Image (cartoon, grey):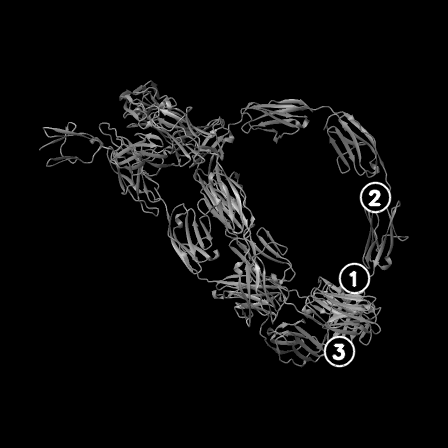
Amino acid sequence: APVKWKKGSRLLRASDKYEMKQKGLCLELVLHSVKLEDAGEYTCDSGDQQTTASLKVKALPVIFKKELQNKEAEEESTVTLHCEISKPDALVKWRKGSVILHKSEKYEITQKGSCVELLIHNLKVEDAGEYTCDSGDRQTSGFLKVKVLPVLFKEKLQNVEAEEDSTATLHCLISKPDAPVKWRKGSLLLHPCKKYEMKQKDLYVELLIRSLKLEDAGEYSCDSGDQQTAAFLKVEALPVLFNQVLQNEEAEEDSTVILRCEITKPNGSVQWRKGSLVIHPSDKYDMVQKGSCLELHIHNLKLEDIGEYICDSGDQQTMASLKVNALPLLFKQELKDEEVEEGGTATLHCEVNNPDAPVKWRKGSLVLHPSEKYEMKQEGSSVDLLIHSLKPEDGGDYTCYSGDQQTTASLTVKVLPVLFKQGLQNIEAEESSSAILRCELTKPDVLVEWRKGSVVLNPSEKYDMVQNGACIELIIRNLKPEDEGEYTCDSGDLQTTAFLIVKVLPGLFKQELENTEADEDGIAIFCCEITKPGAKVEWRKGTVALHSNDKYEIRHEGPCIQLFIRNLKPEDQGEYTCDSGDQQTTAFLQVNALPVLFKQELQNVEAEEGSTAKLRCELTKVDATVEWRKESVALVPCGKYEMKQLGPIMELLIHDVEPEDAADYTCDSGDKQSTAHLKVNALPVLFKEQLRSEEAEEGDLVTFHCELTKSGALVKWKKGSKILHPNNKYEMKQVGAIVELLIHNVNTEDTGEYTCDSGDQQTDGYLKVNALPVLFKRWLKNEEAEEGHSVILHCELTKPDATVEWRKGPEVLKPDDKYEMKQKGHIVELLVHNLKLEDTGEYTCDSGDQQTTASLTIRAPDVKIIDGLKNFEVVEGGDALFECKLSHDNARGVQWILEGIELQSNDMNEISVKNGNIHTILLRKITQDDTGTLIFKVGKYTSSAQLNVKATPATFTKQLQSMEVDENETATLVCELSQSNVPAIWKKGLTTIVFSDKYEIKQEGCIHKLCIHNITSSDTSEYTCISGDHQTTSSLTVKEHVKIIRGLEDITIITQNYVRFECEVSQEDTKNAQWWLNGKLLQNIEYCEIKTHDKIHTLTMKNVTPDHSGTVMFKVGPERSTAKLLVQKPKVVFKQKLQDIQAKEESTVFLHCELSECEVPVTWKKGSVTIIPSRKYEVRQQGPMADLVISDLTLEDAGEYTCESGDQQTSASLRVEALPAYFKQELQNVEAIEGNTVTLHCELSKPGDPVEWKKRLAVVHPSDKYEMKQNGVNVEMLIHNVKPGDAGKYTCYSGNHQTTASLNVTERVIKIVSDLKNTDVFAGESATFECELSDKDVENTQWWLDGSPLQNNDLNEITVQNGNIHTLTLQGLGTDDSGTVTFKAGTLTSSAKLLVKDPAVEVVSEMEDVTREENDTAEFICQYSRPVKALWRRNDKEILPDGHHIIIDQDWNVAKLKICELTPADSGMYTCEAAGTKVAAVLSVLAKHPDILEGLENVDAVEGGEALFECSLSRPEVHYYKWLMDDVPITQTENQETAVLQAGRRHILLLKNLIPSDSCQVSFVCGNAMSSACLNVKGWHISILNTLRDTEVVRGNHAEFECVLSEVVPITEVSWYLNETDIKTNEHWETKAERNIYKLILKNAQFIHSGEITFASRDVIASAKLAILGPPDPPEDPEVVRKNHQSVTLSWFPPLSDGSSVIQGYHVEMKPQESDCWLQCNTKAIEETEFTVDNLVPGTGYRFRVSALNCVGAGEPVHLPQTVLLGEKCKCILVACSLLFYS
């Protein structure tokens, strides 16, 4: 059956919405896509009956499918916030913070289906914040960040010139309206005051400086924060003139006069002069200035003050005359009689009433004048005459007079007796010379008498008597011995006496002795010649006087003297001297001795280790001295080596033979040598005493001990199979056969078996280490902390790194976010983070053996307000959200109070907490009654904010009406709002109108009016009234009259040229236009041409002269325009200005400019200093050309140079590039003798440049040794007291330059030319010893007798002849004086025996052989029958005492020799000799092994390099030592060298040409001592772990390259290159090295840095590309290709440079003719090179510009050269254009 379905009364039909089904009797209505509006009653009607049911639709929640995203955009651009909801077209609300947003010019809200967008136009900084889209069920938020555009200067400051006392205005335009700026003068920040007024209106910024002063001149700057602009203010001073001039004045002497004048400028500077002399303030002159009144006070007037006085202001001067009337002169005090002694000074004194009045002096009638005799003084009223050097004739009357006034007094002179001021002095003179006797009297020219004894002397050839004033001399010529005696000078009143001694001339040698050489047993003859025949002489050998006997024959014939020496012996060799008493001559006798040969040679010997080997030979000469050597090393007697000599038999005994003793041994007699070989059979190394097991506690020192069968044998220590080496843990000792291993600070890990291995046998011992309990050294302490903080509990254990357990009460703590457990050594710490009140309790630290507990107390925090409430403004009916941030979470007792009422959380007030500490309240549906103060309170802290509720916006009930008005009338625009007293804004087009004389804005209740006065055609426009989001607009049309659009402009021109004035009016073909000049109507005549073209009216005047200067006026109807015409004579200007120039130091530079006139004088300046022509500066001028030539440039010549001509000037900067200093004179090689001072000298090209001195690679610093000097360009280094070690190469560095020279030092070899000779004398005689050295003036010489130093006295005469012959004469000798005389000079020693003969002496007690250990003391005692002087010898060499090692004592008849601190070298045969007796005994010293003072150190070396190991011993050792590499002995090769220095104390090993496999342990063994170190050889080959990467960087930014190597390489082995050029560190490039990471940093990248960067080190190289990006160049050739009334199509070509990055597109901007703002025309980048700009206003002119865009940004734009003017349509079409800014 058919049925109908209805919804309510509406009949439903089948569709996509409704589906109707019927199956048999079952009927269905299916509704698809159910919506809320589908709810209602549905009816099924069968015609006969109907049934009805209700459908209820439950709404689904609206959720967000796509959330809002955070956005960032630039200021003044447009940003879009976008989200997507689950239900299309569902209503949403937008909020900023808690403020609901509505559609407006600011906010554009769009919704298309499920997409919702909020567009925010013209972004401001205050638009930043959180934006929320609320669907009712859900909400989504996004944060908007607004990037502030920089405030730039569109128009910069211009230099300003103003007059003093006026106001100066500085102005500029900024890119942002009302942006804050700062004004400065220099660096001083300016603030608004009476002086400075600062204005700012939109983009216009202005600074007014009032009441200008000269000090206001300077640089002023305006700073926007992002940019600054500066300009100079020049203040021209006003001239200082005189309002009132000076008046002539007349005054009396001694009074004060005042000269007065008045200037036009208060406090203006003036100069006072008297004539041409400048006057300065003093006691005489006072200068007073009060405002503009000036006074000059002249005190204590004198006649010389008469004259012209001038006051000069600089611009003007005034003059007046001063007349001074003199006072009459009187004597206030008369002269008085005086009496003075002869020779003194007399003073005559009087006083006058007029100070400084002129007076004159007379003696009798003779007028006196100032001279050395007469001194005249006058100070004020006091007058003095001083008469010096009085003589008897100076007595008499003296008069002082002036005019008719005078005063007289008498002077009496007392005569003095003649005395001697200086008497005669005793003198001494040589025979045949002259002698002078002098004395001085108290009076000149007095007669005296000379006498010798009682004989009066008279002038003669012998005697010459001279008298000069008071000085008297007696000259005695050709002195003879008989002239000796007493001489007297007698003045009559007194006499003086002196004695003359005449020295007789000595006898000298005319011919000196000469050195002689003779054979043994022959005769030697010495001969010399003396100046005085018959003079007595003395012959000496050394210091021993010679007498004629069988040995010596002395002959003397006239002046010739001879000495014959017969039967010559070697001991006759030495120096022989002939002494005349006044002089002596010396010569050397050399006796040639016979050679020592071998009768029996040495024989080869074989011995067993530990035994004694004997080597034996026989000489041809008894008691000859020999030297024993092992290979090339000289042997000395010691415990090892014993040397014996029995007559001609020589023996060498080698004790305790070792394998190292096997070698060739040589006996050298000096003339010949004999060699034999010693073979040694070695014994095995076994253990006499085995190791024992040890037990110890942790931390103890354990010693393992064993004993070998062989002293000094090498052993190895092991723990298990691991070989042990000496370190802080293990210490290995070996003393003789005793070997020890010391294990320090043992722990449980040291438990185990230890082995000592000798190579032939080994022994083991076990070590057991018992662990100590872990206890607490420092206990836990109770702590207190605040909730939310962290706390540290710490304690200290007795054992480092022991395991502990932490507990809180009984609960064991585990490490987590709450608990952090630390342990460093003995210190254990528990850190409890984020403390809660429940963390209070006891905490325990348990070590297992002991525990410590402390309490932790937690304090509740003091909750404070961190970020308070903010004021909120909301529209009535909206919501307000307030937030307050606290210092802690979960604060209690929080209150919200509004106007005294506490608020509770409900539907109207939603109170919540975010993130635990941010408390919020949301006030819903706010009314204006809710306006007030909202307070948030927590504890004692509060925060408040103001809630301001604005009323709902008003709407326009009456719109503006368009109107048409006549020009010059007033137009009134009226509209009406729905609410009264609502503010409104008026706009003309896009420009806001403000109240002014032009515009009058009125508001009467709801009525708003705009009155526009004095209407002109420019007022035609659209006018809009805006109130909130509502506005109304109307058009105003002005009926135009003829008016002047563009008026006349002032013109200044040079005479004889033509001038053209131009004026533009509003209409074409205007009649009745007139031109006037200085009130006279101008006509079209020959020199005056008047024209009209369209709207332009012109006046052209030819050949103008200064008479034409004046006012030019153009008149048309009531309109007029005027301008000033100024005709000037030609002015000199600079046609070609100076150009900035750069030059190098020491060069010559030319500064050139050209003037408009020839031969015009110019002034050159550097800075403010005028340049005067000199050798430095040459000034040239030819015609209009002016040149300044600056020669020999220095760095100080850099600066600004100015050429001035009148008021015109031109300036340029000179930049001087410094030349690097180089060496004009290089260092020169120097050779010097040891001990001298050496000077290394070089010369630099520049004075004062720093230098550095090096010896080889070591830097030399100033010290006592090295003295550095630098005087200007001269550089010196003085090396004092040079030694052979100072030899080498020395280098002087200056920057990158260097100079090197070599110093060669020759050792100063001092030799003994003539040794001391043995001397035998009898008791009571004297003995002379003489030693001749090769050098003179040798220091540190000393004479000794039997070990006692001798001093120069009556018994010991020590002399030096000719600087190098040292003589000792011993007087009054006794038998006890027998002994050894020794002479020492530095290290040189010469000895001889002194035997004082006496009857025979017997030995009572002989010496015994002695054996001692090294460092012990040995003593020999010998007793004689009577006291004698004993001589001690060792191996036939004399022994000298030194007071500490060798002590020789003689106690009556007992001789003692004591040797302390024995060394093996002290071994040998000791003899005691006295009075022909000789007693011998043997001393054997058993050697101790040396200790190592300074051990080996580990060495790290590079493949191919060298390694040096050095070891220092406690004593010399040249035989018993070994070098080992990994326990293998080292042999000498070209790559393995050993050396022994300091006589065996320093041992050196040098390893060369190392390879990595040479890495090993190096050991040095000496006796029982051993030192080891590790050698680590690193390979040269390296690899790159992380290579360089190609880099792109924007110009001006930084770039970094990094390379990682497989190992650390010294920075000196690393190089960086750009395009194969070495990179040096400078302002652009910086290199860094951090371990094996090497970096190159480029700062402020420029295009020149583009290219390939290369890293090189050793054998690896890495490269990468560096690209410098920049903005593109401006596009090329822009043009307009077509246009119509509302669109323009532009075209252009791509830029020449894309800035090294692909061009991404272009921007097109336009600027309307009447606007200053450029507007972007495209919303996205333009990909093509053509673009059409639509929706333009017809009849309007536009400017266009185009810029290119790449990845860096937009480049500089190119401007179309012309303004594009669009045509107009027949009727006005208003186009609304909304521009979106591309971001």
Q: Which quarter shows the C terminus?
A: top left
Amino acid on which the number 2 mark rests in the picture: Thr
For mark 3, what is the residue? 522
User: Residue 21, position in %: x, y?
Assistant: 13, 36
Q: Which quarter shows the N terminus?
A: top left
Amino acid on which the number 3 mark rests in the picture: Gly
Tag on residue 1352? 1
For mark 2, what is the residue? 442
Label 1, label 2: how many angstroms apart (C-alpha)? 50 Å
| The quarter of the displayed image where residue 1776 is located | top left
Q: Residues within 10 Å of mark 2 (few under 14, many from 20)?
A: some
Q: Nearer the viewer, residue 1778 or 1420?
A: 1420
| Apparent side of residue 1048 relative to residue 479 in the rendered image (left or right) | left
Comes first in the chain, label 3 or label 2:
2
Q: How many marks?
A: 3
Label 3, label 2: how many angstroms apart (C-alpha)? 77 Å
| Apparent side of residue 1204 relative to residue 638 in the rendered image (left or right) | left
SS label for mark 3: loop
| The quarter of the displayed image where residue 1711 is located | top left
User: Residue 492, position in %: x, y?
Assistant: 89, 45
